[in-house]
Image (cartoon, helix red, strand yellow):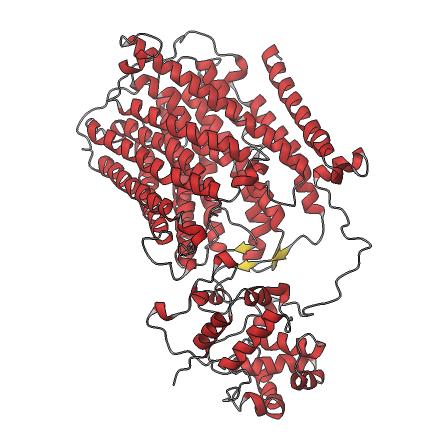
Amino acid sequence: MFAARKLVLAHFWVAFAAFGAAILLGEWQMLVRSPLVGWVNNPEHYYRSVTFHGVVMAYVLPTLVAMAFGYAVCELSLKRPLVGLEWAWGGFWLVIAGVVTAAIPMATGHASVLYTFYPPMIADASFYIGIVLVVVGSWIWVALMAINLRAWRRDNPGAAIPLAMFGTLAGAYLWAWTSVGAAIEILVLIMPVALGFKDTIDAGLARVFFSWTLHAIVYFWLMPAYIAFYTIVPRAIGGRLYSDTMARVAFVLFLVFSMPIGIHHLFADPQIGSGFKFVHAAMTAMVSVPTLLTVFTITASVEIAARLRGGQGLFAWVKALPWKEPAMLAVALSFVMLGFGGAGGLINMSYQLNETVHNTQWVTGHFHLIFAGAIVIMYFLIAYDLWPQLTRCAALPAGLVRVQLWLWFIGMMVLTMPWHLVGLLGMPRRMAYYDYSNPALQSQAWTVTASVIGGLILVVSALLFIYILATAKRGAAEPAPYAFARSLHPNDPVPAGLNGFALWVGMMIALTVVNYGFPIAQLASVKETSVPAVHVGRP
Amino acid sequence: MSRAVLWSVASVVALTAVSIVIGFAWLPSAHPDFTAKGLWDTICRAAGVPESWGSGATRPTVRSTSVVLDASMMSPGSADAAGRGASLALAQCTMCHGPQGMTQSNAPNLAGQYADVIAKQLVDYKQGDRASSIMQALATSASERDVRDIAAYYASLPKPRNTPVTDMDTVPPLVKTGDPMRNIAPCAACHGGIDRKMGAPWLEGMPRDYLVAQLTAFASGERRNDSHRQMRNVAQAMTPREIADVADFYARREH
């Protein structure tokens, strides 16, 4: 790496420190909700904790990891120093300022509105200002990614964008456009109320704007993991990427289809027409396509590695895989969680089936499995893979790394499978306590205890992760030159359409207008739809 | 444009068109609610265009309250207002509610009561939304300004406090956690302790019999000046034993 080493490290450390704190709160939430201890006497404390856990895990961790990985990919794949390093540091400090600004009202109980805001609940204005600063900081990253690509293209006219950089740009453009929804919600609808200029808010319209962000943000979280699938895993296990073109198709499909689908979060909301709910459900089904393409391509890439190592037969090649290699283990565990989580996701997005699981603990199980499980385990791998480049450390202790990855997988399964089960039985999410002495609930009590155990395993794994990174000996070894995975046919030309973004960004915006234009215009024009704001933590 | 680009655009357009036809025309056709007034109406309904619901239907005649609570009612009021309110209170309120808003009778203590609570109840008496032969007669003559001044006066007095709780286990469960399975919110979520909501009175130090009488009246529907049935819904789900327990809790006085 050239100039961005410290920058990337700073992003990673802030992300992982916040992650370490937030996971402890997550486990505390499980504990106080379980039959193991008495009810939490003040439910507000519970929601305060949920807010902090959600804000860190949904905004701080993935945004900083995506930024860090993006800067690293930019230098490592374009093989030149990052343009605009000072601006990148500026973006970093903006994110830090935002986190601190939002953390204060969260800590004092003036922002217990959860990370999804939920108007008409209104938090202290500084909470929203903090979130906006985080987003603006990340927009600097988006701009820098585009600027660096343009500078590289000027010097390499006609060359194919390296795949890792292509994926990073897809994630950046996706984030730039999807964050606009929440930004409008905060700046236009929430801030006037939080600052006291208004005392009512159009909660239905606010929820529609948030749904614009809420689903596509998930694919922004997911991009680093997918980039790692395609560009790190095949190289780390000694294989080849089966198809570079397929990878690019998957990235642009995410770009096009992750935006116009957010209303599938609002199936139970009366302010949206059923026609739009169906169209959003149909398009949500489309985002399973790039994931299925990815599973196929990566499995094929892994098979190449196994055959190169002498693997034989229809399935027996699986035994020839380098299972001791952390990248191999991480991708396998990630796919198992992606499989369960993805299947659950197909149920959530079905207009009809959603009715049975809407707002139950099932949903919590789903997004923990797919994000905290399948995606975050790849964040771990990204950190492990880049650490020698960033700190010039000696090889990380592979045994300990494997233990950490296994613990994360086991913990996540033990945490989320009981959640899925009780969700089907009807247990609602976002509850500070359940009355287990009620005969109707008593039989579900064990599932919450099981989740506490799963959470504890996750805490151990998270602490182990931080320990491994923190104890890596800095400067002990000069790292080998970094390389991304080579494709099976490295000399195949990249189709022109898959070497740029104009078409795909255009489609993303057009579909957003088609799928969101009418509901937003209609809700904004209907009179008397506002409700009194509820200021959280204010007497 | 290359063929691949054309193909991509065409297939996205086709996907969108097909899902719109299914979502706005075909699926709604399965339900008479959607199809009653022809295709255009079906499409409008699927798009979520609001109807003028209930046109022609009679509006419910029983109203709970005419008071719309807003944030301005929560301000404690000026010292002048409190002074005028004290004079009014001396003439009309002290007989039952005590000289400083504290009484040994079973009339509610008003010392330290929130301004929005006093104002709302007085207006409800005046408009006939809360029944009491004494209070309705007194409130009839109170002007808007009198109401504000009396509210400011009582809000300016010190609040009576319960004996401090040292053991959380002695707090009735309905006060601190409610009962989610019966849709009973915790008392402390609105009446102070956890949070305070507009219109919800300060309860500590209230006479026990008054609390029991009011909860029972809410439960039977005899008292109905609570906006959106907030208290009737809670009280109807409570047993007489639970009403007695929470009344005991709030009536425990510091000595």
Identify the residue at the far front of this view. Answer: A439
Is residue A230 something that shows in the picture?
yes
Q: x, y percentage for residue A304?
A: 34, 11
Q: How many marks?
A: 0
Q: Which residue occupies the foreground of this view, A262 or A85? A: A262
Quadrant in the picture for residue A303: top left
Quadrant in the picture for residue A18: top left
Is residue A328 found left or right of A474 in the rendered image?
A: right
Is residue A525 found left or right of A422 in the rendered image?
A: right
What's the residue at 38%, 27% (across, down)?
A: A336
Q: Which residue occupies the foreground of this view, A299 or A531? A: A299
Q: x, y percentage for residue A396?
A: 21, 29
What's the residue at 33%, 29% (across, down)?
A: A382
| Figure quadrant of the N terminus of chain A | top left
Relative to A516, say whether A169 is above or below: above
Quadrant in the picture for residue B225: bottom right
Q: x, y percentage for residue A233?
A: 34, 21
Is residue A85 something that shows in the picture?
no
Q: x, y percentage for residue A400?
A: 21, 31
What's the residue at 67%, 24% (across, down)?
A: B18
Q: Which residue occupies the foreground of this view, B178 or A42? A: B178
